[in-house]
Image (cartoon, rainbow, N blue to C red):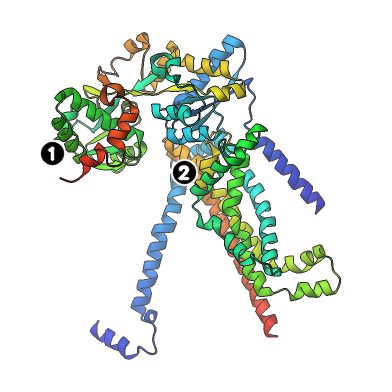
Amino acid sequence: MASNRARSTRSLQHRRVGDSPAIKWLLIGIAIAVTTGLLIMPLVVIFTEALSSGWSTFADNLLDQYTLHAIGLTLFVAALTVPLNLVFGVALAWLVTRFRFPGRKLLITLIDIPFAVSPVVAGLLYLLLYGRNGWIGNWLADYDIQLMFSWPGIVMVTVFVTCPFVARELIPLMQQQGSEEEEAGVVLGASGWRIFRTITLPNIKWALIYGVVLTNARAVGEFGAVSVVAGNIRGQTNTLPLHVELLYQDYNVVGAFTSASLLAGIAVFTLAAKGFVEWRQARTVIRLQAQETV
Amino acid sequence: MQRKLKGLVTGLALSASLFAPAAVSADRELLNSSYDVARELFAAYNVHFNEYWKEKTGDSVEVSQSHAGSSKQAQSIIQGLKADVVTFNQVTDIDILHTRGNLIPENWAERLPNNSSPYYSTMAFLVRKGNPKNIQNWDDLIKEDVALVMPNPKTSGNGRYTYLAALGYAQDSFGGDQQKIDAFLRDFLGQVKVFDSGGRGATTTFIEREIGDVLLTFESEVLNLVDRYDNGEYEVVTPKVSFLAEFPVTWIDEYVKQNGTEDLAKAYLEHLYSEDAQRLLAGFHYRVHNDTVKKETSDRFPDVKLMSIDAIAGNWENATEEHFASGGKLDQLQRRK
């Protein structure tokens, strides 16, 4: 041990901490232990608990009328949220990277508000604004329009919580790419839509898909904000994450884990998709850099 | 591209029609906003009520259920969750529907029998197999080697009920001797090993984590737990004196008018007092008022001297101000000596 230390001191200039095999394996061991304990084990527990009473119970829980509705509602909300934020994200990124105007920096900062605000607070804000006693909700109620405690409210808060993902992915990439190619398109007389379709879109394709994957993952899994505005009506406004909590409250632990395993399944699928997209994106960046050096 | 878009739009419209509104095929609809652990109870009652109503009027009824903590439910209703009826576990949460929401009249509690509380419960103890610490009543809880588990009175209605039950016992035993009452409560709180944030959390602590000798919670919950773990691992102890925990119900005047459900909402709640429904409620371990059912279930529900909030603290407002507010009695008693 002493000689070991002496040796490492002597060669301090040439060697980094991780070079000694003992330390290397120690660090790797800690990393594996932490990953196993904090990430892999809980994931395994979800699936083993879900299947703890056998496949038929798993299927029964899955095909329960309320679970099916929760799955449908969750997918429905994601199906509305993702396209909305896709358009919003692209438009916003286009605006702040291709144009200079006063308040541009402020706008870039404002995009991050949904990340900075706790989802529960976000839900409450919507409730206070669009609820029966809220400024807008009060006015809408006169026309018999109700947004909170029904699916439009769930979609609204989900859009809010997930709106930065696409823009945040696109802005750095579009800044790096610059607008030369688009300017060339303008000079050659292409229409705005054609420039977007043939130049901008192919350039940002993978970052865009990455943003969509993240948006979708969050839209499916959002609990806090939705919990405030959903009203927890089983079979009407109960999304999958809310359903997990409800089942757990009912002592239906197996049912809760069955629904949780669906969410975990979506998460694993999302991670795989994310990995694939990152890999493609890395290739695009390498290609870009190669072009720049040429 | 266009065909794809068309397909997407139709798909969305289809899923919207499938999932967004409930697939209701019944003649009439009702929304019941309830507390978080009442799902099984009302799932059973809704079936029962549908049969009753169909026989009486020929219409079928689909009752939707919303479940969450009853304070959160009250907030949602004030903000526009159009529930026709509420079935809560705390009187104060219905009161604010009048004071803050102006949705029901002030005298809502007088509109149905028994303070609009068709069933009630009290606070009881769950002890481990064989009752090794020989717990019989509240004074056994302050013996030195007894560790208690209960929900936190600061965050949970369940915990407030337990605290008030202990206070009621002390008032009953020590008369007006305020010093003795305070001393008992201080000792009692000192024995609590875990204050969980809610009732379900306390149950988990006692059963799954195996902490403590006594779990203090609703009698209905305690009996339910004994049913669930029918291997005799736990025993129920009902103290001689305890708190009258009411489960108030009412219809929301403002919303039943909008929804056109006034007759249905009233019938739904009034029917809770019928003999059949009371039997069903007793099956879920709640105490009921119907004499026939009371006789049938007397072995499960021993006689207890039940003290109401009026007897213990005057009313809920006083109780909150004097005991649970910041710097109130609860805080003073928990301060280290």
In this view, the mark in front (1 or 2): 1
User: Vertical placement of A169 versus B330: above or below?
Assistant: below
The tag on residue B144 is 1
In whole angstroms, how far apart are the C-alphas of marks 1 and 2? 40 Å
What residue lies at 45% left-to-right and 40% top-to-bottom? A254
Element carrying mark 1 = loop
| Neighbour tally class for label 2: few under 14, some 14-19, many 20 plus, Cα within 10 Å | many
The tag on residue A257 is 2
Foreground residue, B256 or A181?
A: B256
Instruction: Locate residue B26 relative to residue B41 in the image: left or right.
Output: right
The kind of residue on which mark 2 rests is Phe
Res. B135 visible in picture: no
Instruction: Locate residue A35 relative to residue A2 in the image: left or right.
Output: right
Badge 1 sits on which subunit? Answer: B
User: Vertical placement of B54 versus A214: above or below?
Assistant: above
Element carrying mark 2 = helix
What residue lies at 31% left-to-right and 91% top-to-bottom? A10
